[in-house]
Structure formats: structure tokens, C-alpha cells
Image (cartoon, helix red, strand yellow):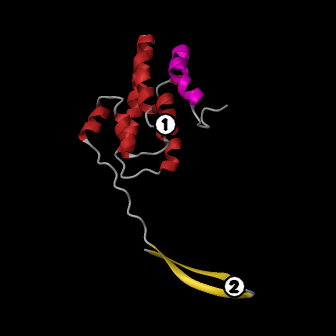
Amino acid sequence: MRELSYWFLVRKSSLLYIVSGEITHLPSPPSKLPEITDKCLQYSKDYDCRFYDCLNQRFPCGESSRKGKARAHCVKSKERAHKLTDVGKIWINNIIKCFVKEMTEVYKRPSLDCTKGNAMVMGIQQRCYTSNDFCNVGWEHRKELWNIFNEPITSSKSHFYKM
């Protein structure tokens, strides 16, 4: 419980009155997060894109229109992986594994500051791509990668994609 004292002037007719008082603020109870489930952890272990649904349910940050984007991007990456060379397939699967592993640690947290979520996710993406040799392997597969990333980049409102 927090009390806030205040003073302010009130004009009534041509007289000014000083009014004081206290406002009592009872903090609202924190909303209960959905539990960490074995089913969701199994999705994570299996690198199943449904894991992102669990993550969004546990930490419902952001616009509702963006909630399915991570899962859709994961599915699209897996669907298009067959068009890559053998090295490219290993590479994209390692990136997916890296990202799911990192996001699983986020999923296990007791809380998440949604205002810092986007920057955190972008940092995870950066680490996963650079630690998996994006500059060398990615360049060889740039055409197919463009097909995977084109829609998220062109439709995103994020400043990270803007040039």
C-alpha cells in the first residue's frame, strides 16, 4: 500500500483555498502467469514451432496481430529448408535450435519486462545467426533466405528492419 500526500489550490469565487489530503493506492495484484508446462518444454526439446504458442501464452507481450509471427516464421523456415544445400539445411536447423533454446530460457523466467522484449529477441537472433556463421553460409543461400524473411521484413513496424 502506498500513500500519496497532495496539496493544491482551489478557487471558489474570488478566494483561494489550500486543500490537502491523502490518496491511498493499493497496488493491483500481479496477474498470475500461466504455468510452465511439460508439454511446452517438450515442444522446445523437439524444436517444434508450437513452442512459440506456449511462449506467447506465458508472456502475452505486444500486439495480438504479431502473436503468431514467430511460429509462422519458424514453420516457414522449416518448410523452405529443403531448398537449401546440405550445409544450408544444417545451418538453418542450427539457427532454429539456437533460437528455441534461448527462448526456452526466457519461457522459464518468473517474469518478463515486455518493454525490453523486442531488444532482447533481436539480441538473441543476432547471437544465433552470427554464432552459426551467417556471413559465410548465409550469403550462399541469400535468395532462399530472402524468400523466408521477405514478408516479415516488409510488413514489420519494427525499427530494426528499417534502413
Quarter of the image with the N terminus in it: bottom left
Seen in the picture, residue 148 relative to 22 is either above or below; the reply is above
| Residue 43 locus on image (x, y percent) | 30, 32
| Residue 26 locus on image (x, y percent) | 43, 71
Q: Please identify the residue farthest to the left as the structure is shown.
A: 38
Is residue 83 one of those drawn in magenta?
Answer: no
Q: Nearer the viewer, residue 89 or 64?
A: 64
Which residue corresponds to mark 1? 65
Q: Give residue 12's mark.
A: 2
Quarter occupied by residue 16: bottom right
Q: What secondary structure is marked by label 1?
A: helix
Q: What secondary structure is marked by label 2?
A: strand
Query: How many tags in the picture?
Result: 2
- Residue depicted at x 62% and y 37%: 159
Is residue 149 one of those drawn in magenta?
Answer: yes
Which portion, as a residue range, is magenta? 135-155
- Residue depicted at x 57% and y 29%: 155
Seen in the picture, residue 99 relative to 16 is either above or below; the reply is above
- Residue depicted at x 36% and y 43%: 57
**Amino acid marked by disc 1:** Ser
User: Magenta region, mostly helix, strand or loop?
Assistant: helix
- Residue depicted at x 44% and y 37%: 67
| Residue 117 locus on image (x, y percent) | 49, 45
Give neighbour class at mark 2: few <14, some 14-19, many 20+ (Cα, 10 Å).
few
Q: Tell me if 43 is positioned left or right of 56 in this view.
A: left
| Residue 147 locus on image (x, y percent) | 52, 17
Quarter of the image with the C terminus in it: top right
Q: Nearer the viewer, residue 36 or 34?
A: 34
Quarter occupied by residue 36: top left
Q: Nearer the viewer, residue 131 or 94?
A: 94
Q: CA distance from mark 1 to mark 2?
A: 50 Å
**Amino acid marked by disc 2:** Lys
